[in-house]
Image (cartoon, grey):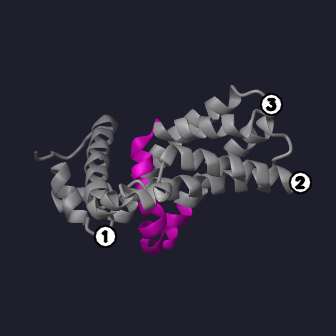
Amino acid sequence: MGWQRARTDENKSSRKEAIYHAAFTLFKNNGYYKVSFNAIAVEAGFTKSNMYRYFSSKDEIFLNVFANLFELWAADFSQQLRALEQDVSAKYFADVWLNSMLSQPKLLDLMPILFTSLERNSSFEQLLAFKRLSKNLLYRLTLDITKVYPDIEGEKAFKLLNLCYAATTNSWTATTQSDALKKLYKLDEFQALKPDFEKDLTTSIEIIIRGLKASI
């Protein structure tokens, strides 16, 4: 497909959505390093010169894709937090977090890339804009968390979010296994080491919450 120059905001938005979709597909299937700016253009049906009308690099594209998904997740999770009673069990909170993440599978797929690749390659300006957006979204969530757990506020609420996010990334990354690793986990002696995303993540979050409460 060849795109003509967008002349309205609606057309520009649809062009960006096409780029986001193409980029997500390539990043998920090939990893960050194996995807080029030109490959994204080809996948989206753009010429390279047309792509530069919208983005300056694949780093910028990735950050925009991730930011959109992160905003969707944050809005959904905030809504769920506001529906919780005060001092719900750590297990219940962990289940709410888990379900909010499972509702955003694209975000889960890109989270490991953000930690392992992108933050080493983006420019200062790109990271600054992204980090400011993330910080603002997380700040709003800390307010919701403090309403659920009054004894977890301020920096501790930020720490809860950051640790839960890191645990999610680690647990999700472990679900991507080579054929050899899948075969290994079928052996009886390694059954106990086999990753279980849902169980591992909720257990980790329960431990994090209890630890933060104990440190008060």
Which residues are the magenta region?
103-129
Please name the residue that numbered disc 3 is placed on. Answer: 86
Amino acid at pointer 1: Tyr
Element class at badge 2: loop
Nearest the viewer among 2 and 205 is 205
Please name the residue that numbered disc 1 is placed on. Answer: 33
Gap in angstroms between the C-alphas marked 2 and 3: 17 Å
Amino acid at pointer 2: Ile
* Residue at 39% across, 61% down: 60
* Residue at 77% across, 35% down: 148
Q: Position of residue 102 (x, y in %)?
A: 47, 39
* Residue at 45% across, 55% down: 191
Which of disc 1 and disc 2 is earlier in sequence?
Answer: 1
Type of secondary structure dominating the magenta stretch:
helix
User: Label 3 near label 2: C-beta < 8 Å?
Assistant: no
Gap in angstroms between the C-alphas marked 1 and 3: 44 Å
Please name the residue that numbered disc 2 is placed on. Answer: 216
On screen, 86 above or below 3?
Answer: above
Membership of 203 in magenta stretch: no
Element class at badge 3: loop
Marks counted in the figure total: 3
Residue lying at the far left of the rendered structure: 1
Q: Position of residue 158 (x, y in %)?
A: 71, 53
Q: Position of residue 171 (x, y in %)?
A: 50, 54
Which of disc 3 and disc 1 is earlier in sequence?
Answer: 1
Amino acid at pointer 3: Gln
Which of disc 3 and disc 2 is earlier in sequence?
Answer: 3
Residue lying at the far right of the rendered structure: 216
Residue 203's label in the rendered image is none
